[in-house]
Amino acid sequence: MNSARTTSTLFLLGLLVSCGGAKDNTEPPAELTAIKTEVPLQLNWSLDTRASRNSASYRLRPLVIGDRVYSIDTNGRVTCVDLVKGRKLWKFDTDLTPIAGLSGNEQVLIATSQDGDIVAYRESDEELVKLWGTRIQSEIRSPPVVDGDQVFVRSVNGKLRSLAIADGAEQWVVSRRVPSLSLTGNSQPLVAGPLVFAGFDDGKLIAYERDSGQTRWESTIAAPSGRTEIERLVDVDGRFVLADGVIYVASYQGRLAALQAFNGELLWSREFSSYQPIAIDDDALYLSADNSHLWAIDRRTGSAFWKQEVLHARRITAPAVIGDNLVVADLDGYLHWFSKADGTLLSRIRTSYTRNYVQPIAWQDTVLTLDRLGLLASVSVRQ
């Protein structure tokens, strides 16, 4: 069985379990507990961004540019929303079938599809104008990265490409072998100065020269172990982060590690399992483990400041940092507020009645969240 078919099969099995089509052997989610001193929250607005009632947006994270947010659903419709008022400004049908969110900046928006399409648009008079399009022979499960005059695209067949922002011409491509079984998803490339970093399904993090695609260094974040293919999953799927010349990266069923960005030297590592993006501030890393425990990790040493288990098995998203707090969303459409200092649960608010997959987005003093059916919502602390 090829990798794409295997990962798709795992994903569909997961959906069947969640929908009652198969016996669910997963742990039951923790019951919500009472909060002693609750921080008052308010729902500023919510908006349905779906093109059709049966369109499900699983990991199509919205893109914030200035005071606007752009979302795309599985029917390929792009919706532009005013972040302050929650008002829909325009919508545009791309005719793509995306499984990753939009990327871009004020000059260009990049949309992709499960068929391998990569299309660049320019916003003009409340619509999108196509600049160029190209197609590769693989699904694209993470948003491309736009940096300067390059677009970096990671595809499910283990390839990383650099395309010219001007016309989509391929500048270079590198490839890694894909294990026979891997998680549904890929990590987004990270660009820093002359290097671009990519994580792969075999547990490797590799730094490439952004101009040529030549390998600068590679590091094994986690090595496969165990007798079954499932036990040997070590995908580097979460969005890793860079700060002060150090890259922080986590793998599924593997490790959390800190490496020097310029040479890949390992500074510290610890056992950890996560396929979610990492949040960061000046002192700590904040992560959602695969059992939905929330962690704060010392950036300097890798030791834990605290661990919060109150949302065990509630399938929480990666955390977002907003001021002195952390925010995660869960399987029932709740947003949960925690203290960064000690992990105390401070408050919760329900923005929908279905699961949130994507990491909430902090914008000014508000938090944006998108549920799996495309309901976009804005929440803030009530003054």
Image: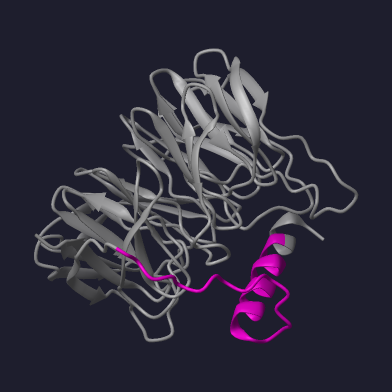
Residue in the foreground of this view, choosing between 48 and 36: 36
Residue 51, above or below 89: below
Residue 251, above or below 97: above
Residue at the image point whose x is 57% and y is 50% from the top: 289
Residue 194, above or below 256: above
Residue in the foreground of this view, choosing between 377 and 133: 377
Residue 38 visible in this rendered orientation of the protein: yes
Q: Was residue 33 drawn as part of the magenta stretch in this picture?
A: yes
Q: Which residues make up the magenta segment?
A: 7-36
Question: For residue 290, what is the image quadrant?
Answer: bottom right
Residue in the foreground of this view, choosing between 360 and 89: 360
Which percent across, then down, holds residue 18? 60, 78
Which percent across, then down, holds residue 213? 54, 24
Residue at the image point whose x is 80% and y is 51% from the top: 231
**Left or right, 241 with reference to 106:** right
Check the picture and name the quadrant holding the C terminus: bottom left
Q: Was residue 237 drawn as part of the magenta stretch in this picture?
A: no
Residue in the foreground of this view, choosing between 169 and 301: 301
Residue 127 visible in this rendered orientation of the protein: no
Which percent across, then down, holds residue 50? 33, 77
Residue that protrudes farthest toward the front in the picture: 36
Residue 358, above or below 268: below
**Left or right, 59 with reference to 149:** right
**Left or right, 268 with reference to 374:** right
Check the picture and name the quadrant holding the N terminus: bottom right
Which percent across, then down, holds residue 163? 44, 36
Residue at the image point whose x is 51% and y is 30% from the top: 248
